[in-house]
Image (tube, rainbow, N blue to C red):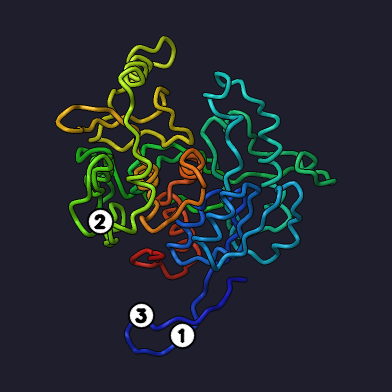
Amino acid sequence: MPRQRKSKDRRGTGLLRMKKTLTVLDLFAGAGGFSEGFRQMGLDVTYASDNWNPALKTHEVNFPETKVIKADVKELEPEQFKGVDVIIGGPPCTEFSGSKRGGNGNTDKGLELVYRFLRFVYELKPQWWIMENVPRLEQFLPKEIPLKKLGVNKAGNFKIPQMQVLCAADYGAPQKRYRLISGKYALPEQTHWESTGTVPLPGVKRYNWVTMRQILSSLPDPLGKPVNEYVKDPNYGFALPIDKLMDHFDTAQIMTDEEAKRNKKAKTNHAYYGKMKFPDDLDRPSRTVMATQFNASRETMVIEGKVNGKIVYRKPTVRECACLQAFPLTFQFCGGNVTTKYKLVGNAVPVKLSAALAKAILKEGGLPILKEPILQK
């Protein structure tokens, strides 16, 4: 059953009333993009589990109210999480990625962790559950799975009620990231569209996709000196003292002429994967934020800048990547080094997509929907 908690009456009477809150278990939690979206919508992220120390530390810092558990999911037992209303999570997608050995990853190995996630769903029977992964997983994951593959010694099948590929940009994220959303959930209402030429249903308030330029223009130039005392969060609008802005100036890196040349060639003259923009088109949502940002890599985003009047090329900072994933400026990444922080950010679920899914669940459950997200400032 949903937990009960007391909160102030938002109608201004000053009285206390009982408010229902859904409890959430986040498996394969990573940095916490999935958890952040659900917390912003007022759900209680009760448990989070991962086996990677930087992810665990990041969760502990940003979600002090959550019980964070370090464990391999294959060693966890579902019974210790009885009573949760929602299970969310994104089993590692590396083996299903088209970039893993040209799409020839070990899908059987990847499915082991997918099936383990589904075993938790089968045992705990939450009211809602959502599993996030790359769209390519749909080619390998049937909608009905024999229970024995989940490690359940019974006859019968486990059924996945819904599998849908969603684009994060359609829900306000400044990133054109497509993800396969599987589970038992309510389909969120689209809020953003590619152009003004698209007409949604009558009465639906529409917005255009959020672009890279909108994000970058709100942040100070990482190659220069700050000119303002505060920075405005490009996704949520609150102001942060410039000296509290982390993972931005200290993670800026200019490409060498040779690196820029190799990157441009890989993007604009690739024999197999087609052409890409060099530098990236700032007037569209970003491409998928990757977990690795190597200067000469084809997949790395490239931003044009200037130093002493000279045009230079750079990759996005950790904070810029985090904003493209719709993390608030106050969200901190405990990686120890820049490479680990890029990985924490790139592997996360876009927060705006997560929040849209949480909002749809609340609506389906007849629970109160917040007008503004809850932000940890």
- Residue at position x 37%, y 52% from top? 246
Whole-percent x and y of residue 74? 74, 46
Secondary structure at numbered mark 2:
strand
Q: What is the distance, in whole Å, between disc 2 and disc 1 at their CAs?
A: 37 Å
Callout 1 amino acid: Arg
- Nearer to us: label 3 or label 2: 2
52 relative position to 374: left or right: right
Callout 3 amino acid: Arg
Q: Residue furthest top?
A: 271
Name the residue carrying label 3: 10
In which image quadrant can residue 313 be found?
Answer: top left
The first of marks 2 and 1 along the sequence is: 1
- Residue at position x 32%, y 31% from top? 254
- Residue at position x 62%, y 71% from top? 1
Callout 2 amino acid: Val
In which image quadrant can residue 86 be found?
Answer: bottom right
Can residue 164 be seen at all in this image of the molecule?
no
Secondary structure at numbered mark 3:
loop
In which image quadrant can residue 137 be found?
Answer: top right
Secondary structure at numbered mark 1:
strand
Whole-percent x and y of residue 365? 50, 65
204 relative position to 105: left or right: left
- Residue at position x 42%, y 54% from top? 356
Q: What is the distance, in whole Å, between disc 3 and disc 1 at their CAs?
A: 10 Å
Q: Looking at this view, is 328 or 178 the one in front?
A: 328
Name the residue carrying label 2: 231
Q: Do the CB atoms of the residues marked 3 and 2 lie less than 8 Å apart?
A: no
Whole-percent x and y of residue 94? 58, 32
Q: Looking at this view, is 129 or 288 the one in front?
A: 288
The first of marks 3 and 2 along the sequence is: 3
Which mark, by number, is residue 106?
none
